[in-house]
Image: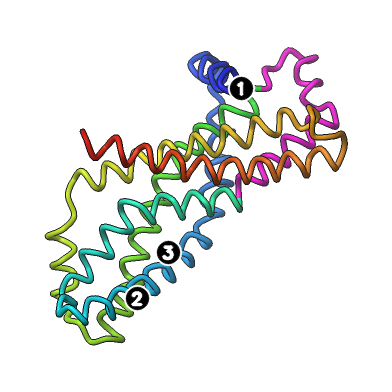
Amino acid sequence: MACFLAISLYYMILPPYLINRVIKQVHFIGVKTILVIGLTGLFTGMVLSLQTYYVLVTFGAESKLGAILSVSLIRELGPVIAALMVIGRAGSALTAEIGIMRISEQIDALDAMALNPYKYLVIPNLLAGLISLPILTAMFIVVGIWGGYLVGVTLTGLSSGVYFGAIADSILAKDVLLSLYKSLCFGVLITWVSCFKGFRADHGSGFGAEGVSRATTQAVVLSSVLVLVFDYYITSIMMFV
């Protein structure tokens, strides 16, 4: 997998630069995932606000609702849940698409025509992941904060000024950078694993539909686990920087 990523990064700096392919994959990975991100972000913010409010009330600290909600979304929940949603909607599809191309020998046909499969299949997805994940994460966070507003202010009666004031006082530039670093890392991670499993759909996974289904399952599981593992390590590193 490391060699696969290294080869992809090497070809990324070499022409031709397939801008149209990158735009197409940004649309597939990013634009088509907006609805899922919006729904999950809204209800994540709502349920987090509901649970947190009734805990804070017992300590008389309900004014800190906005601070706890925004910090949780920006540092952890936003990047992680957005990445998991992208894995489920786009990562699995990427693996299946490339896997079908592998078992139907379309990738071999690209080689036969002297067209680099990495240029056409891998690099556009890597770049699209780098572009899409930070934007989707930001959308998730914003929608989640407004979801928390709906519950914390509209339902429980907390002052909107107190809610947004706590957010403004608690968020630091370091928190936003941490979220950005995580989303960039997850974007590369998801597309890297998905493309690698698709490329090797006929290696040890069986042949035909069985190989594609196993490769897709492996890509989703491995991507999800690696997102959580890298989330921990990035957080632990940033805490000491």
Q: Is residue 166 above or below residue 73?
A: below
Q: Amino acid at mark 2?
A: Gln
Q: CA distance from mark 2 to mark 1?
A: 47 Å
Q: Main secondary structure of the magenta part?
A: helix
The dot on residue 41 is 3
101 within the magenta span: yes
Going from the N terminus, do you reach mark 2 or mark 3 first?
3
Q: How is the image coloured?
A: rainbow
Q: Amino acid at mark 3?
A: Gly
Q: Position of residue 10 (x, y in %)?
A: 52, 14
In which quadrant will I find the C terminus? top left
Q: Are marks 1 and 3 in contact (CB under 8 Å)?
A: no
Would residue 17 appear left or right of 219 to someone viewing this image?
A: left
Q: Which residue is drawn at the image coordinates 23% and 87% (left, top)?
A: 157
The kind of residue tagged 1 is: Lys
| Mark 1: secondary structure | helix
Q: Residues within 10 Å of mark 2 (few under 14, many from 20)?
A: few
- Residue beneath label 1, please? 119
Q: Residues within 10 Å of mark 3 (few under 14, many from 20)?
A: many
Q: Is residue 223 left or right of residue 155?
A: right
Please give the residue where the numbered disc 2 appears in the rendered image. Answer: 51
Give the foreground label among 2 and 1: 2
- Residue at the image point whose x is 63% and y is 22% from the top: 118
Residue drawn at point x = 18 percent, y = 55 percent: 171
Q: Is residue 238 left or right of residue 204?
A: left
**Circles 2 and 1: CB distance less than 8 Å?**
no
Q: Of circles 2 and 3, which is in front?
A: 2
Q: Secondary structure at mark 2?
A: helix
Quarter occupied by the N terminus: top right
Is 24 located above or below residue 86 in the figure?
above
Tell me where the magenta segment starts and ends, as one range. Answer: 90-117
